[in-house]
Image (cartoon, grey):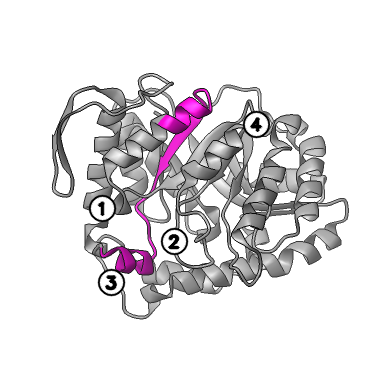
């Protein structure tokens, strides 16, 4: 299993400026190569404290690429629903060049109704825009002189520049939350999967669906599963819980507030059961997150036990992506947590065995 870090900003100007957030994030990236973290990852979201500081992951990852020389750089994830595929393809290839071929490209459908509303995109177009966009980006990266006539974007005889550094293109991942269909589609396409245990649900069943769909479609290997967790490592268990409890609970409330329209009237056939998903998240607490192993909090030994427990529960996975500065965790606290995890946990995780690779 490989372990990296991710940045999901969950702050607004009343808590921390954008300048301070991203400058502090780069200081954390400065620890990545020293301790052997696998990747640096960030999201694409808009408008609210929940994710809104990261409208374009490529910008931060380009800066991070100059701080770390070994880690993968992961878009976790870009949103085709709000972007022209011609722009996405060009930006991804440029980022792949800047990081010397260390890019992994993650794509997501988006799920926050307010983002669709502000961009003027109907929720019911989410699936179609995503499928069309990912396929057009794939072709633009793999091929030259591309012609595509789509429902939302069309172009003729286009060669996107720059060409990718990785050939035929960077590995692709698909973000999925809680529906079997999303996991099956990612597996059938042969791509990696990004998922979030925080949402609960039958993760083993979902990952089995992904792997079975991948095998049924004739793809070799089990694929690559990347799961996201909150992480706070400390020499003292009680102190770790004290530090992490309130920020995790504020993070959960922020997520539910950002997605509240699902429980107050928003509906879409593209998002079946999302009202129930958000209702379930509204009942989550620090304690339930720790209990279900979605938050790795405690001493190195306790975190190692948590990792082993969760790997058994879900049948294993290839990559863990850790939020280390969630909500308003102070920079020094996050740095000490990363250092301790890097010194006491990472060396005891099997990071040398072959892992699946996204396609």
Would residue 109 be counted in the magenta stretch?
A: yes
Q: Earlier in the sequence, mark 4 or mark 2?
A: 2
Q: Earlier in the sequence, mark 3 or mark 2?
A: 2
Q: Tags 4 and 2 in contact by the CB under 8 Å rule? A: no
- Would you name the residue on which mark 2 appears? 46
Magenta region includes residue 143: no
Label 4 to label 2: alpha-carbon separation: 26 Å
* Residue at 63% in and 72% down: 14
Residue drawn at x 49%, y 61% is 52
Q: For this view, does 106 lie left or right of residue 248? A: left
Assign the N terminus to one quadrant of the image.
top right
Q: Earlier in the sequence, mark 1 or mark 4?
A: 4
Q: Crowding at label 1, few (<14), some or many (≥20) Cα neighbours within 10 Å?
A: some
* Residue at mark 1 to residue at mark 4: CA–CA distance: 35 Å
- Sequence-first tag of 3 and 1: 1
Magenta region = 94-120
Q: Dot 4 lies on which element?
A: loop
Q: Is residue 52 above or below residue 261?
A: above
Which numbered disc covers residue 267?
3
Q: Residue 30: x and y, percent?
A: 71, 38
Quarter of the rendering containing residue 293? bottom right
Q: Are marks 2 and 1 in contact (CB under 8 Å)?
A: no
- Viewer can see residue 174: yes
Residue placed farthest to the front in the image? 19
Q: Is residue 309 left or right of residue 135?
A: right
Q: Which residue is labeled 1 in the image?
A: 127
Q: First in sequence: mark 3 or mark 4?
A: 4
Q: Give the residue at mark 4.
A: 68
Instruction: Please indicate whether residue 166 sits to the left or right of residue 311 in the image.
Output: left
* Of marks 2 and 1, the one in the foreground: 2
Instruction: Estimate the spatial distance between the alpha carbons at disc 2 and disc 1, rounded to whole Å.
Output: 19 Å
Between circles 3 and 4, the one closer to the viewer is 4
């Amino acid at each position: 299993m490989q372990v990296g870090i991710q940045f999901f900003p969950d702050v607004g100007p009343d808590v921390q400026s954008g300048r301070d957030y991203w400058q502090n994030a780069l200081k954390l990236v400065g620890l990545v190569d020293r301790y052997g973290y696998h990747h640096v990852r960030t999201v694409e979201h808009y408008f609210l404290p929940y994710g809104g500081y990261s409208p374009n992951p490529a910008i931060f990852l380009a800066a991070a690429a100059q701080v770390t020389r070994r880690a993968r750089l992961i878009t976790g994830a870009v949103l085709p629903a709000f972007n022209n595929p011609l722009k996405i393809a060009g930006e991804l290839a440029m980022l792949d060049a800047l990081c010397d071929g260390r890019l992994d490209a993650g794509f997501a459908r988006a799920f926050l109704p307010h983002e669709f509303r502000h961009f003027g995109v109907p929720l019911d177009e989410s699936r179609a825009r995503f499928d069309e966009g990912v396929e057009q980006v794939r072709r633009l990266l793999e091929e030259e002189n591309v012609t595509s006539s789509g429902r939302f974007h069309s172009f003729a005889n286009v060669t996107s520049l720059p060409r990718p550094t990785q050939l035929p293109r960077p590995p692709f991942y698909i973000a999925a939350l809680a529906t079997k269909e999303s996991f099956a589609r990612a597996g059938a396409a042969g791509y990696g999967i990004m998922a979030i245990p925080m949402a609960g649900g039958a993760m083993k069943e979902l990952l089995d669906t992904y792997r079975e769909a991948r095998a049924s479609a004739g793809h070799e290997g089990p694929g690559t599963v990347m799961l996201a967790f909150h992480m706070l490592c400390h020499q003292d268990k009680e102190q770790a819980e004290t530090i992490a409890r309130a920020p995790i609970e504020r993070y959960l409330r922020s997520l539910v507030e950002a997605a509240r329209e699902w429980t107050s009237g928003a509906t879409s056939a593209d998002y079946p059961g999302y009202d129930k998903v958000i209702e379930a998240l509204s009942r989550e607490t620090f304690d339930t997150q720790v209990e279900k192993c979605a938050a790795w909090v405690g001493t190195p030994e306790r975190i190692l036990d948590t990792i082993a427990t969760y790997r058994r529960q879900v049948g294993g996975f290839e990559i863990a992506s850790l939020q280390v500065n969630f909500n308003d965790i102070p920079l020094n606290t996050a740095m000490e947590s990363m250092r301790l995890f890097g010194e006491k946990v990472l060396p005891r995780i099997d990071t040398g065995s072959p892992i699946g690779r996204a396609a």
